[in-house]
Image: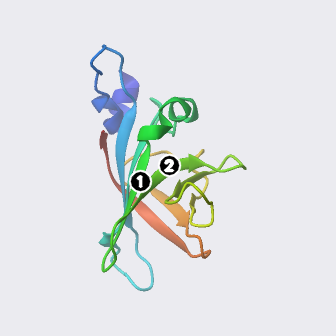
């Protein structure tokens, strides 16, 4: 299967108990190089459980039917982990939310509809205070 060779992690789609292939993946983002971390940091990042299409892009239709298990964990050295969920904003953008009662704490994932989710690629995230960081996709594996 050509897509399997191309996208690596997609090759690990695991059959569920009823024989239907699952598209949920654990995506690990680690802080890329920036002023305060010139070598990047494995101690600052996110782990996100999200559905991916065979082409390596987020699957909005699958997310809609399984959003209850599309979670996020923010790990940041010196701070307690934050646990939340992968959401779609009113404008249709992807974000991480830690309090479902408000969107004030949401962290926006920049242009995630067009990004290829593959190890070694880069994505940007904007925090609730407007700060923007770039992250390297450190790993993509079956959830």
Name the residue tied to disc 1: 72
Between 59 and 114, the one nearer to me in the picture: 59
Where is residue 102? Give x, y as percent. Answer: 62, 60
Q: Which mark is residue 134?
A: none
Left or right: where does residue 91 sit relative to residue 60? right
Question: In the displayed image of the protein, which residue is found farthest to the right?
Answer: 91
| Kind of element beneath mark 2 | strand
> The residue tagged with tag 1: helix, strand or loop?
strand
In the image, is residue 70 above or below residue 134? above
Q: Which residue is mark 2?
A: 86
Task: Examine the rendered structure and indicate whether residue 134 appears above or below residue 91.
Answer: below
Tag 2 and tag 1, C-beta contact below 8 Å: yes
Measuring 51% from the left and 39% from the top, which residue is drawn there? Answer: 57
Q: Nearer the viewer, residue 13 or 7?
A: 13
Q: Position of residue 84 (x, y in %)?
A: 44, 55
Residue sitting at x 65%, y 50%: 89
* Rendered location of residue 23, percent (x, y): 40, 30
Camera-side residue of 77 and 35: 77
Q: Is residue 139 left or right of residue 125?
A: left
How many other residues sit within 10 Å of disc 2, few (<14), some (14-19) or many (≥20)?
Answer: many
């Amino acid at each position: 299967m050509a897509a399997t060779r191309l996208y690596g992690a997609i090759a690990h789609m695991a059959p569920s108990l009823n024989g239907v292939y699952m598209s949920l993946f654990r995506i690990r983002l680690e802080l890329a190089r920036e002023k305060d971390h010139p070598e990047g940091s494995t101690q600052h990042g996110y782990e996100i459980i999200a559905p991916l299409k065979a082409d390596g892009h987020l699957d909005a239709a699958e997310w809609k039917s399984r959003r209850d298990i599309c979670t996020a964990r923010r790990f940041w050295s010196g701070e307690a982990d934050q646990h939340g969920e992968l959401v779609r904003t009113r404008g249709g953008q992807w974000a991480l939310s830690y309090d479902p009662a408000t969107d004030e704490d949401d962290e926006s994932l920049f242009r995630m509809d067009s990004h290829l989710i593959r190890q070694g690629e880069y994505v940007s995230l904007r925090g609730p205070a407007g700060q923007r960081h770039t992250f390297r996709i450190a790993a993509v594996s079956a959830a």
